Image (tube, helix red, strand yellow):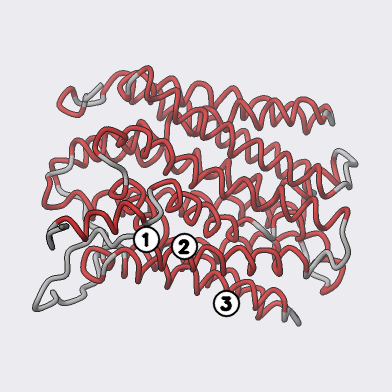
Amino acid sequence: MINSDTEPRQRDRRRPGYKAAAAVFAVGMMGTTLPTPLYGLYRQQIGFSELIVTVVFAVYAVGVIAALLIAGGFSDVLGRRPVLLAALGLAALSAVCFLAEAGLPLLYTGRVLSGFSAGLLSGTGTAAVLELAPPRLRGRAGLAATAANMGGLGLGPLVSGVLAQYAPWPLKLPFLVHLALLAGAGTVVCLLAETVPRADPRPALRPQGMKVPPQVRGVFGPCALAAFAGFSLLGLFTAVAPAFLTQTLGERNLAVTGAVVFCVFCASTGGQLLMGRIGARRALPWGCAVLVAGLLLIGASLLLKSFLLLLAGALTGGTGQGMAFRAGLTEVSDAAPGSHRGATISAFFVVAYVGISLPVVGVGAMAVGLGVRTAGVVFTACAVLLVTAVGAWVRRNLPPAAVRS
């Protein structure tokens, strides 16, 4: 006869595990980059400048930052499943905005909702994947969470690019497919075990805010700047790469555009895995160096109008971004006191997402007067200077107390 303590454990073993949670995470993140290859089509249909393209992209980061600052810790109180369902619901509303698109207001609304979804998913999805894994598989679960995050971001432009190029309804079908995937993901979430014990009475929901304890600031500054620079590269590819490819390199195949952006995020995943092998202390300056090499290749591709150099820059820069980002996150997390770790990590992500938005808006503004090619060259030159300075500073001055390699 099975006793009452054994029954819940057996039911939990029959539920989907951490791999299913990782798949949900990937589906949710996929929607945030789904419009990337489609911006050129929106420009033709609605009629707006390259600056507006970057602004439409950048308002996504506003949603992410707001979600991180306001609701970053809500899943610790409400549970993982309710917050995951809310994130998927916001992603579905974003897709509906794009399906009903009738001008810029709905595009802006869809991007902000997508940002809210990503902000909720980034912390809650990672926590759910890690907590659903047995202790012996915690390392694999960490890898699954990383792959789901960056893999989902990469799959968005790949799927929408292929559908827009080779299937009917290029501005509708990608979002219809995503809605179907979200419905499946929502069903999986309902079947997942809840990993947050229910508290009675329930603690009050309070905005987390952005707090960096004084003892962490020496580590936080250079690590956050490295994340800022690395995410600006991701922002460049997800917002401006289609214009680079069409206007500078003459590549108009939307599937190719999506594949190039996919390569950046795959390379970032590889860089994060590489960081695990060499340790955070060495990976942070080395990641900056590899990121500089990737930026130089991107700049050269624009000057020489070479698709192969752009692809090499995407792969190299993505690898460097992944190394520097995970190393910086590890250093900041290890240096932060336990009572402020969540807020400190959220602050780190806020800086990173500012990096994914503000620089690309600057590129869009320059492109209006100077052209996409010149704007891209100026951006890469500025980014090279920033990353070089950060890498040199980190190599010489990172406090020994932060080293946890």
Between disc 2 and disc 3, the foreground one is 2
Lateral position of residue 51 relative to residue 270, left or right: right
Residue bearing mark 3? 93
User: Residue 317 at what x, y percent from top left?
Assistant: 58, 30
**Dot placed on the residue nearer the N-terminal end, 2 or 3:** 3
**Dot placed on the residue nearer the N-terminal end, 1 or 3:** 3
Task: Please tell me how crowded label 2 is: few (under 14), some (14-19), or many (20+) other residues with Cα within 10 Å.
Answer: some
**Most foreground residue, 176 or 114:** 176
Amino acid at pointer 1: Leu
User: Residue 121 at what x, y percent from top left?
Assistant: 42, 59
User: Residue 278 at what x, y percent from top left?
Assistant: 37, 17
- In contact (CB < 8 Å): disc 1 and disc 2: yes
> What residue do we see at 31% from left, 70% from top?
70
Say which quadrant the C terminus sits in: top left
Amino acid at pointer 3: Leu
Residue bearing mark 1? 192
